[in-house]
Amino acid sequence: MDLTHHFLIAMPSMADPYFARTLTYICEHNENGALGVVINRPIELTVAGLFERLDLKLDVDALREEPVFFGGPVQTDRGFVLHAPVGEWGSTLPVRAGIGLTTSRDILEAVGAGAGPGKLIITLGYAGWSAGQLEHELQQNAWLTVEAQERVIFDLPAEERLPAAMDLLGVTFASLSDGAGHA
């Protein structure tokens, strides 16, 4: 099973406050585990605020009030930039479909100068699963999965991303049960 470039949709029964009602984009999934970022949970910090904290120059007015997102509970003091196209940055994990996840400062410097990728989401932290952990959670009906679409990630406001991913499955939250069953 390879869920790279898939969305994880938290089931209504998800009790973990980090993941309740989240949409997570899986950037890497292999025999060693999985890594993704939550893409629908903006935090109080704006891009301008983040750049100020990092002592970086931000010359792109259109980005000033864009939110920074809670990417997950792992390394919440570290920034992750989910972006398209992939480009060539110091530390990038290329994801299928021309999307990359970059952790190096050079991408933020380029973004501030107006020379960064055309589409991006900046997160603090990421979501990680050890080998077999995500598969176990899927067996426990904690998540729904669907192949990701770039337009859902980058072209929709944060509050529309989860419903749009649900639409890809043809279901709504109202139609989902809190309990799991086995036939």
Image (cartoon, grey):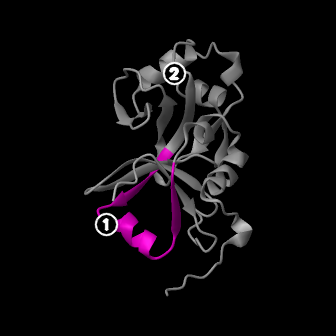
Callout 1 crowding tier (Cα within 10 Å): few <14, some 14–19, many ≥20: some
Q: Which residues are magenta?
A: 125-147
Along the line of sight, the residue nearer the viewer: 7 or 159: 7
Q: In the shown orientation, is residue 157 left or right of residue 3? A: right
Q: Percent position (x, y) of residue 78?
A: 45, 40
Query: Disc 2, disc 1: CB below 8 Å?
Result: no
Left or right side of 93 for 31: left
Secondary element at tag 1: loop
Q: Quadrant of residue 57?
A: top right
Query: Which one is in front, 29 or 62?
Result: 29
Q: Which residue is mark 2?
A: 117
Answer with mark 2 or mark 1, whichever residue precedes in sequence: 2
Q: Position of residue 133 (x, y in %)?
A: 36, 67
Q: Residues within 10 Å of mark 2 (few under 14, many from 20)?
A: some
Q: Amino acid at mark 2?
A: Pro
Q: Residue at left 59%, top 40%?
A: 153
